Amino acid sequence: MSNAQSLDIPEDLQEDDRPKWDNKFQYILSCIGFAVGLGNVWRFPYLCQIYGGGAFLIPYFIALVFEGIPLFHLELAIGQSMRKGSIGVWNNISPYLGGVGIGSLMVSFLVSLYYNTILAWVMWYFVNSFQEPLPWSICPLNGNRTGYIEECHKSTSVNYFWYRRALNISSDITDSGNLQWWLVLCLASSWAIVYICIIRGIESTGKAIYVTATFPYLVLTIFLIRGLTLPGATEGLVYLFTPNLNILKNPRVWLDAATQIFFSLSLAFGGLIAFSSYNSQKNDCEKDAVTIAVVNSMTSIYASIPIFSVLGFKAITGHWDCLDRNIISIINEFDLPDQSILRDNYTAWLEFLNTTHPKKIAGLKLRNCDLQEFLDQSASGTGLAFIVFTEAIILMPGSQGWAVLFFIMLFSLGLSSMFGNIEGILTPLSEVRIISKSVPKEVLSGIICLISFVTALCFTLRSGSYWLEVFDSYAGSLPLLIISFFEVTGVVYVYGIKRFSDDVKWMTGRQPNFYWQVSWRIISPLLMLIVFIAFVTLQTQKQPSYGAWNPKYEGFPMKEEKDYPAWILAICVLLVVIPCISIPTVAFYHLIKRVLGRRKRKDLNPVNTLSMAPQEN
Amino acid sequence: MLGVLLLVFSLVALAHAELCRPDAQNAFKVRLSIKTALGDNAYAWDASEEYLFKAMVAFAMRRYSNKETTQISNVLLCNMTERVSFWFVVTDSSKNVTTVPGSEVEAAIRMNRNRINSAFLLTDNTLQFLKISSTLSPPIEPTVPVWLIVFSVVLCLVGAGILFLVLSGIRQRRKNNNESAENGDLEDKCDTPVTTENGIPCDILDLKTGRINGVYTADDERFTPL
């Protein structure tokens, strides 16, 4: 006997007024756009580089096969079968698990706050890329025009532009300062752009996604062609992909591969559930899941090629600059003819001069120019995009065009991910009965964008970048792992793997095979648990600290390591706890309701305890 | 006579040598990097180029002081190296065997740096006067910051987009409302699905107290009261 929760509902009873995708391609593209985000461009290449290049691909693919794809398929399947947003889906699976949906909603909200702030920064750089010369290529002059501003002179012009002209960062997270008006403007326009695209839910994002999901691939290809023709590209690529198999013995590599796959696929946000809920039920979600997850990983690898070509170019230019400076010093000191020492015979000359005039050479204080050292200067995250890559762009001819292209690409990558985040908020909210049905979709999405914009203003303070780091490390990491663990155990053990497999068979036409059964039942939950424990262990091992940009620090331009004060640590804990607390809270609430309900029924019917009372839905 | 002349010459030469030597007072070191600047079109540094240099320095001094007293012979070069670097000093023709103060020379060179550079097809970096720092030219600031212009364009597009979408949404909704008003009462009845059981709405049947059926109430009197 099947009750309403499993899927024997004949098709004509399905809600016909639920919005749906114009075509399958729109749906696939939306999921790909959601999964492919900024992390594919600035996190994966960095991990590849520090974890032994090509060797990192091994744990990465193992994590993809045993953790990424099964969880992805699970989310798509439950969304498609139950045709509701995350809250509705989890209430359907079991009322005790309703908190999982609420948790997803809150995490989506917290993440979209800071994610759009990053897009605001990208927009700031974009509007500044139309100048000749690029504003981050030169240091501004100081007051009496005798030299450059000291902060810029000691660090680099690129660093100065990022920390001073863009963020106007304070030297401590507790020193909030004022709202930076240019960032407020950029943030307002980012949220306005997001609003335009999600104004009517998937009707509007479906149209926007054709551009925002495909444009990054176009730009990456252009950068690939340009990057491969730059000098130093081969050094960069060789450095990136040279496998160092010894690195696999380090458990940290496996953990980072697992977390990278997990965060890269945007699981546990509720966005995927929302997207697939707009599908027709007879859709092959298994094929979709495998396709999208593989495309996401391929995009990461594809993106790392132009990134590392350009970084190789930057490294070799830095190396040549170092050599040139040394050569000039030697030529000036020994009054040798101009251009007598070239980069090729520099080492030969240096050895010769060292034997004949060692004291003079020592007195010159020549810097040791090692190409490896330049290649090792890696960065991930905002450091890669706004400091390292922008520095490389200055060196390329036609830098304005490359800068504009690069920042439009980053903006569309982030925008398509924002669609998924906001859908993860919009869809469940429009189904929960708190908001009346008469509120038009435009107003609901407008209110969400407005509330998010006002809340995100805290990231435009002078300490905003530090706060963003806090949000990224705490709200955007641990709660997702927890929610995903409850997702997979909830579906497999509470809903029942047999029932779930039957649902999938009804939708796709074939029973999930041995790989899916084993992954869902054992491997994925186990992996999620291990990853969660390892992650927590690593986070709690050392006192959480952050790197502050303090011009008055003696080690400047190195960042000053500061510890978070207690009240900020409390906020970090809150950021983790608040999304997750809904899971036990809702379960507890339903438990209490059931216990009280049973007691009330016993009081009403002291004789008859047969289950004539309607079952709790 | 010849001997006296020779003596005078050697004295002058000696004096010149005294005036122009590395690290002498009011002397400046010059360094040229011709090959770096011109590559294949580099010219060789020879006596004629030295003559041109002396002429340019004399020109600079004349321009600066506005008196036409400095002669090419007043500019002395010494310590020529293969680097191409040398020292030079400017003597004062009015007073014997003295050099023009370094500050004057510096000011004169700075004022005419562009002319001197272009005479040799070089730049500030490739024709270096070691003690004379070039004033850094400020970056060109346009009257309206460029980023503001681009930003306004973006904002206008975004604003126009929002306005268009909201207005078209309102128009669509008004059209839908008009259509539904035409279909009228039939739609209203179907809107709220009322569960029915045998044609009787269920919420009436749900009354806990029950409904008194008039057929049976009359029969109460059939039974004898206890």
Image (spheres, grey):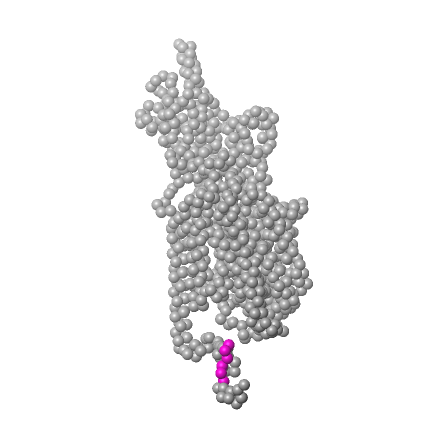
Q: Is residue A58 visible?
A: yes
For this orientation, the residue located farthest to the bottom is B222
Closest to the observer, A50 or A574: A574
In the depicted structure, whether residue B19 falls above or below residue A425: above
Q: How many marks?
A: 0
Work out whether A551 lies above or below A40.
above
Chief secondary structure of the magenta portion: loop
Decide if residue A501 is in sight here.
Answer: no
Kindly indicate the quadrant of the structure image that contains residue A375: top right
Image quadrant assignment for residue A452: bottom left
Is A322 covered by the magenta stretch?
A: no
- Residue B209 magenta-highlighted: yes
Quarter holding the N terminus of chain A is bottom right
A604 relative position to B149: left or right:
right
Residue A179 position in % (x across, y down): 41, 47
Residue sticking out furthest to the front: B226
The quarter in which the C terminus of chain A is drawn is bottom right
Q: Residue at x 52, y 71 (%)?
A: A15
Compared across the picture, whether A207 is left or right of A606 comes to left
Judge by depth and name the residue closer to the eye, A519 or B98: A519
In the image, residue A277 above or below residue A374? below
x and y percentages locating residue A443 in the rendered image: 42, 63
What span is colored magenta in the figure? B208-213
**Residue at 61% across / 52% down in the picture?**
A532
x then y, percent, for residue A367: 55, 33
**x and y percentages locating residue A90 in the rendered image:** 56, 63
- Which residue occupies the extreme left position in the image? B67
